[in-house]
């Protein structure tokens, strides 16, 4: 499953890179034809990059959620599960130390 997610992520990055290059080329052509100003082209490119970044973050979040769900279904402990167990262990150790220090 991890290999599948990794390949999907790399495919997305590659697609985004190619899309960016094509957009830059097209915007440059429009500037050369005086159909866009340089500032308009920069603004469009910035908007494209912001949308791409938002999608990348959304995809990363969905991938993380899917990985957690897969781990849960497989019975594998997540970092959150381990952290909760560590907190319980610390609390139990403190309680044991407290009980052992009381005179009988």
Image: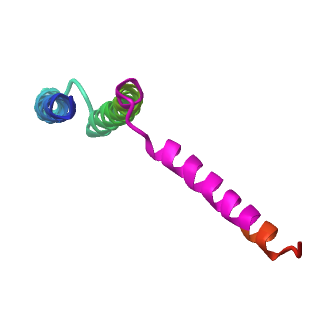
Could you say which is closer to the camera, residue 11 or residue 41?
A: 11
Q: Residue at left 49%, top 48%?
A: 82
Could you say which is closer to the camera, residue 72 or residue 30?
A: 72
Could you say which is closer to the camera, residue 90 or residue 40?
A: 90
Q: Residue at left 13%, top 30%?
A: 11
Name above or below for residue 83 compared with residue 6: below
Name above or below for residue 46 compared with residue 100: above
- Residue 40's x, y, as percent? 32, 33
93 falls in the magenta region: yes
104 falls in the magenta region: no
- Residue 69's x, y, as percent? 41, 26
- Residue 79's x, y, as percent? 45, 46
Q: Is residue 101 left or right of residue 39?
A: right
Q: Residue at left 39%, top 23%?
A: 73
What is the span of residues highlighted in magenta in the rendered image?
Answer: 71-96
Q: Main secondary structure of the magenta part?
A: helix
Q: Residue at left 36%, top 30%?
A: 51
Query: Which quadrant, please, contains the C terminus?
Result: bottom right
To which quarter of the image does residue 15 belong? Answer: top left
């Amino acid at each position: 499953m991890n290999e599948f997610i990794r390949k999907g992520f790399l495919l997305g990055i590659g697609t985004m890179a190619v899309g960016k290059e094509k957009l830059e080329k097209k915007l440059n052509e429009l500037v050369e034809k005086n159909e866009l100003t340089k500032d308009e082209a920069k603004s469009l490119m910035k908007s494209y990059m912001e949308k791409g970044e938002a999608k990348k973050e959304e995809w990363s979040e969905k991938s993380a959620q899917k990985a957690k769900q897969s781990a849960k279904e497989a019975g594998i402990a997540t970092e959150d599960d381990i952290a909760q167990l560590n907190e319980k262990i610390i609390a139990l150790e403190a309680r044991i130390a407290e009980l052992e220090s009381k005179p009988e």
